[in-house]
Image (cartoon, coloured by chain):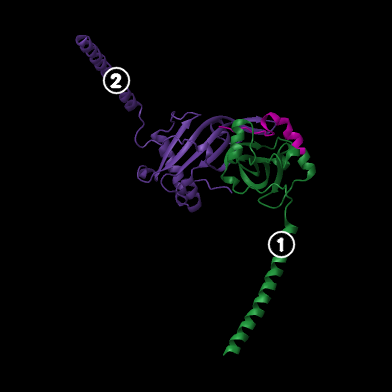
Chain colours: A green, B purple
Amino acid sequence: MLIHENSKRLVLQVGQRRAILLLLAVAWMVIWTLILWAKPIDAVPYPAGYRHWVHVKSMYVGPQNPAFERNGGLHHIYANEKAMEGYRTDKFPDGSVIVADFFEPRENAGVTTEGPRRRIDVMVKDSKLYAETGGWGFEQFRGDSQTDRMVTPQIITKCVECHSQQKNHDYVFSTFRK
Amino acid sequence: MLIHENSKRLVLQVGQRRAILLLLAVAWMVIWTLILWAKPIDAVPYPAGYRHWVHVKSMYVGPQNPAFERNGGLHHIYANEKAMEGYRTDKFPDGSVIVADFFEPRENAGVTTEGPRRRIDVMVKDSKLYAETGGWGFEQFRGDSQTDRMVTPQIITKCVECHSQQKNHDYVFSTFRK
């Protein structure tokens, strides 16, 4: 009986060792997958839940505009609570996020509605992380994707060049439409 | 000294009576002003704070549309939290409020922005108060006014006729655009 119990314990111990080794192997793979897929430390995160943020203002880019092919349709701007503070004070605190949401136009009898999403443009304020670009991080996500990033270093240079015209409003073009 | 004190008391009493009479007169005027200005019990209240509600969707009515003169420009729909439940379930609970916000167009080089506010259209769900109109109360407020009501019984009849096409979606035309 005692031997039988001991042998059982031995079987369990071998099983446990195998399980531990398997767990270690899986953990090793998961960690490396995460490292390889990881975004750089200064990457602008996808602005989860922005569709429930405050709607700042909108515009419509029509066929007469030279950028119609690329930007035609309805655009909306959304702001999180911290960014709303910035719209009130002209000083956007760290953690402010502003999203511009671009839609293809769907026109019928002169009424244009929102077609598929072209992309979202995101600005995130972090005065330390993005000190070299006016305290703002810039990113674009293609269509409805939360991972397909469109911004390159060249595009970021253009973002900063253009937005720095608005230094008095902390690099932000839009104002809150009442 | 005693006589002097008594006369003082008398003067105070006369003064107090006058003050009380004046207060009563003022109260009487205030009450009647309120009664005369009061909205009917089933009036749709102005949707205070709706600009911070969720933005449901938008459209642009252009010059090619026959209603351009009256409705041309950008339109936005906002919903309070209860109405958001309705957009998810197709059943809008009492207390749901939906606002359609209409702006005159300001066009430049094919880009149309939001000019002055034309009006807001408001739908409020109260299945008892508005039982005769599908459970919804309808109102319009002119421009930026919170008191200039545009809806007449004739307009309400039209609202209900049109919205009753959407009985499957609880009289609501819009759907939440993700």
Identify the residue position indicated by label 1 in the image: A31
Q: Alpha-carbon neighbours of circle 2 within 10 Å: few (<14), some, or many (≥20)?
A: few
The answer to whether B122 is drawn above or below residue B91 in the figure is above
Name the foreground residue: A138 vs B130.
A138
Identify the residue position indicated by label 2 in the image: B23
Q: In the image, residue B164 lies at what x, y percent?
A: 44, 46
Query: Is A152 left, or right, of A18 in this rendering?
Result: right
- Please state the chain letter of the residue tagged with numbered disc 2 in the rendered image: B
Query: Is A165 left, or right, of B79 in this rendering?
Result: right
Amino acid bearing label 2? Leu
Residue A111 in view (yes/no): no
Q: Quadrant of residue A126?
A: top right
Mark identifier at residue B8: none
Residue A16 in view (yes/no): yes
A144 is within the stretch colored magenta:
no
A168 is within the stretch colored magenta:
yes
Q: In the image, residue A109 lies at what x, y percent?
A: 60, 40
Seen from this angle, which residue lies furthest left?
B3
Give SS at disc 1: helix
Tell me, yes or no, whether the two marked residues, 2 and 1, touch with CB atoms within 8 Å.
no
Task: Identify the image quadrant of the C terminus of chain A.
Answer: top right
Give SS at disc 2: helix
The segment highlighted magenta reads: A158-178
Q: Alpha-carbon neighbours of circle 1 within 10 Å: few (<14), some, or many (≥20)?
A: few
Residue at the location (64% across, 83% down)? A10
Name the foreground residue: A2 vs A111.
A2
Q: In the image, residue B108 lies at what x, y percent?
A: 67, 30
Mark 2 vs mark 1, foreground winner is 1
Same chain assignment for discs 2 and 1:
no
Amino acid bearing label 1? Ile
C-alpha span from label 2 to label 1: 78 Å
